[in-house]
Image: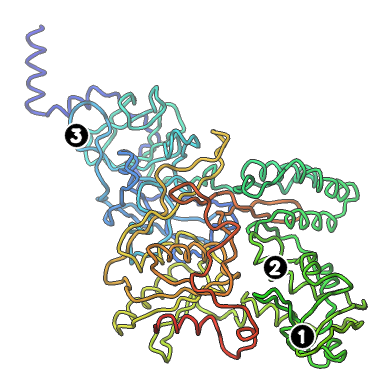
């Protein structure tokens, strides 16, 4: 009998192969709804992050080849032939988003042998349903779209471990798998180590064709329905916190705790969250006690103003307060020069100041008996808060000469050429021309109509190229298409130099900004790292393999001419990172009268009662030496254009003229 058994095994090995024997030894997978395997996947993409759709031009639902996760290869690039594109079947800008994916008869993903039987088998194709945006590639996702490669850790059908020591590990969710024959195996659980695709995984034999693997059951179940629902998972780190159903004080306490643990710059800015809570909580308590939503919104506004960070903001705004406090004018706008004089930069025709004898360029010495520098420092702009002193000061100059209507203002000034100062009493009037002038003077949205493209360019009379990048928050695909068209035109026409005007760019997608800067380099420089608070560790965590580096475009799309980047205090956030990147190897001259705004953190938004949304920076950028970059100081000009009477009253653009002169030299 024993001899007969040996003959049978030998016969099977000779005729069927070792793989078939192993398949016979593996228990069969637990199949549900065996209809031959899926032909169509439907599902929903849900998101809570208010910024999720910002800038998205070409959203994609795809089947994502998971070979990168199987091998733990963070540089794995999805082969174009493996990318099975789905269809978005509802309004992408309203969550949840519906989609469907028709499955091909012969998929082309990477085959991976995951049964760990010691034999080399054909393997299976493993997919996750995933959300991506196509920013750079023509029809398929490429390295830049994929942030350098790897696998999705949010907005995919897999659930990812929040533990940084298990970075990117799949701990649940659903996979779609394809077996080319019926001799393949697949894990039916995570094994004792809790990890997938490791040696201790229990393995089952799977049928030929498609199956959906549910990893939230124990053991895994394999769905062979013809139509299967597979939803994406937003992920713990991606979902927005929602305190909107709490009472005012409960929401305040939750907000304070979030700032206390997650705010990126507590130590840098020397913030005492206990003291801040003690200062503002009584305002929320009073608003709650009186059921007063206006008092609550006002308290929320004042709380965000108290944190010296331009990225901290809320939707809280009481228009009546703003109109009351800024509605009155004495008919001037003022600027502070490099020599520290504060002078009249705009004089309203027929206004109180002009009628009292104040002249353009007059030096302002005091307001209501307070020295002008102190009066400016005491002003509280409604555009608060600010990360940098220079950005704050420019806004305070605007607000220092605004008052409620019906008030009298004492002004002490000294006209140009006068030997003695004068003091006059002025009645405020309702005029906004001086307000608009001061707004435009510091660059914020000056002259914009709302019809601008993300970037617009031209060839100047000097033969130098000029491009103005308005935003990194606009349609990403359109932005890149315009950018690459610019590179093509610059190279074809052999333009020797390029001016990049960033002075009205309020920021947007930092990764997009970095990759647009990459068109001027030949090396994939590592740029910076971002650290954020990790709940598992209870501290800020920096990924040892940071993703922020240049992913270079093809060489024919790079530009090698001289470059000048124009900056100012309205250049914020992603705009500043672009400007910072352009300082690498002194690639560009940074030209301006002031540094950029100094907003360095990566932001998150969350929900509060009464429909309010609060924003805070939750990630901290550092250079290779661990030093915090940009936050609080901005990117300073390497070519400083003076702020003096000559530049202030010129009919041209002194910063642009300085850039042209620099490139011509």
The residue under the point 10% across, 7% down is 2
- Neighbor class of circle 2 (other Cα within 10 Å; few <14, some 14-19, many 20+) is some
Which residue bears the numbered disc 2? 393
Q: Which of label 2 and label 3 is nearer to you?
A: 2
Q: Whole-Å distance between the Cαs marked 3 and 1?
A: 86 Å
For this orientation, the residue located farthest to the top is 1
Q: Whole-Å distance between the Cαs marked 1 and 2?
A: 20 Å
Tag on residue 548?
none
Residue 173, image quadrant: top left
- Neighbor class of circle 3 (other Cα within 10 Å; few <14, some 14-19, many 20+) is some
Tag on residue 121?
3
Residue 15, image quadrant: top left
Which residue bears the numbered disc 1? 362
Q: Quadrant of the N terminus?
A: top left
Q: Position of residue 180 (x, y in %)?
A: 23, 41
Q: Is residue 275 above or below residue 12?
A: below
Q: Quadrant of the C terminus?
A: bottom left
The residue under the point 89% across, 72% down is 369
Nearer-N-terminus badge (2/3): 3
Determine the secondary structure under disc 1.
Answer: loop
Residue placed most toward the observer, 368 or 419? 419
Residue placed most toward the observer, 595 or 509? 595
- Neighbor class of circle 1 (other Cα within 10 Å; few <14, some 14-19, many 20+) is many
Determine the secondary structure under disc 3.
Answer: loop
């Amino acid at each position: 009998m024993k001899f007969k058994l040996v003959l049978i095994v030998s016969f099977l090995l000779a005729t069927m192969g070792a793989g078939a024997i192993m398949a016979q030894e593996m228990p069969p997978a637990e199949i549900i709804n065996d209809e031959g395997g899926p032909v169509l996947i439907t599902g929903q993409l849900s998101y809570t992050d208010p910024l999720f759709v910002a800038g998205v031009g070409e959203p994609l639902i795809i089947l994502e080849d998971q070979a990168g996760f199987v091998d733990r290869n963070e540089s794995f690039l999805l082969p174009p032939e493996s990318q099975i594109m789905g269809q978005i079947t509802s309004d992408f800008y309203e969550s949840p988003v519906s989609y469907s994916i028709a499955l091909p008869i012969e998929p082309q993903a990477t085959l991976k042998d995951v049964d760990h039987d010691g034999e080399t088998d054909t393997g299976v194709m493993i997919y996750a349903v995933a959300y991506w945006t196509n920013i750079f590639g023509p029809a398929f996702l490429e390295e830049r779209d994929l942030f350098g490669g790897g696998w999705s850790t949010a907005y995919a059908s897999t659930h990812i471990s929040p533990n940084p020591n298990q970075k990117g590990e799949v701990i649940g969710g659903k996979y779609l798998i394809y077996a080319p024959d019926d001799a393949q195996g697949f894990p039916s659980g995570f094994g004792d180590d809790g990890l997938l695709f490791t040696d201790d995984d229990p393995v089952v034999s799977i049928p030929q064709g498609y199956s959906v693997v549910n990893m939230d059951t124990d053991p895994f179940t394999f769905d062979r329905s013809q139509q299967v629902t597979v939803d994406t998972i937003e992920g713990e780190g991606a979902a927005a916190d929602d305190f909107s159903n709490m009472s005012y004080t409960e929401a305040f306490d939750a907000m304070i705790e979030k700032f206390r643990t997650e705010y990126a710059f507590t130590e840098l800015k020397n913030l005492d969250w206990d003291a801040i809570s003690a200062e503002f909580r009584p305002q929320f308590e009073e608003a709650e006690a009186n059921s007063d939503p206006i008092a609550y919104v006002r308290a929320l506004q004042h709380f965000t103003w108290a944190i010296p960070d331009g990225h901290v903001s809320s939707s809280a705004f009481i228009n009546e307060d703003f109109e009351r406090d800024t509605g009155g004018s004495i008919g001037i706008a003022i600027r502070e020069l490099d020599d520290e004089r504060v002078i009249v930069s705009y004089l309203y025709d027929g206004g109180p100041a002009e009628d009292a004898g104040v002249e353009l360029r007059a030096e302002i010495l005091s307001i209501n008996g307070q020295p002008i520098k102190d009066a400016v420092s005491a002003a509280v702009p409604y555009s608060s808060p600010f990360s940098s002193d220079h950005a704050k000061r420019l806004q305070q100059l605007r607000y220092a000469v605004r008052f409620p209507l019906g008030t009298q203002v004492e002004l002490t000034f000294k006209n140009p050429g006068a030997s003695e100062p004068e003091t006059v009493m002025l009645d405020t009037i309702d005029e906004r021309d001086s307000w608009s002038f001061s707004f435009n003077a510091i660059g914020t949205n000056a002259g914009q109509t709302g019809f601008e493209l993300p970037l617009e360019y031209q060839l100047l009379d000097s033969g130098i190229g000029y491009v103005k990048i308005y935003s990194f928050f606009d349609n990403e695909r359109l932005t890149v298409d315009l950018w690459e068209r610019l590179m093509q035109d610059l190279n074809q026409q052999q333009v020797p130099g390029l001016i990049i005007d960033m002075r009205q760019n309020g920021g947007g997608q930092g990764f997009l900004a970095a990759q647009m800067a990459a068109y001027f380099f030949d090396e994939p420089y590592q740029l910076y790292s971002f650290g954020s608070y990790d709940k598992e560790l209870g501290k800020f965590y920096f990924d040892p393999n940071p993703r922020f580096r240049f992913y270079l475009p093809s060489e024919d799309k790079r530009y090698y001419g001289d470059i000048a980047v124009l900056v100012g205090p309205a250049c914020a956030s992603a705009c500043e990172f672009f400007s910072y990147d352009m300082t690498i190897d002194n690639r560009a001259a940074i030209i301006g009268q002031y540094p950029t705004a100094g907003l360095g953190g990566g932001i998150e938004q969350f929900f509060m009662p009464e429909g309010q949304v609060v924003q805070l920076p939750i990630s901290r950028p550092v250079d290779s030496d661990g030093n915090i970059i940009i936050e609080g100081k901005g990117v300073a000009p390497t070519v400083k254009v003076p702020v003096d009477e000559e530049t202030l009253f010129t009919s041209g653009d002194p910063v642009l003229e300085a850039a042209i002169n620099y490139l011509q030299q």
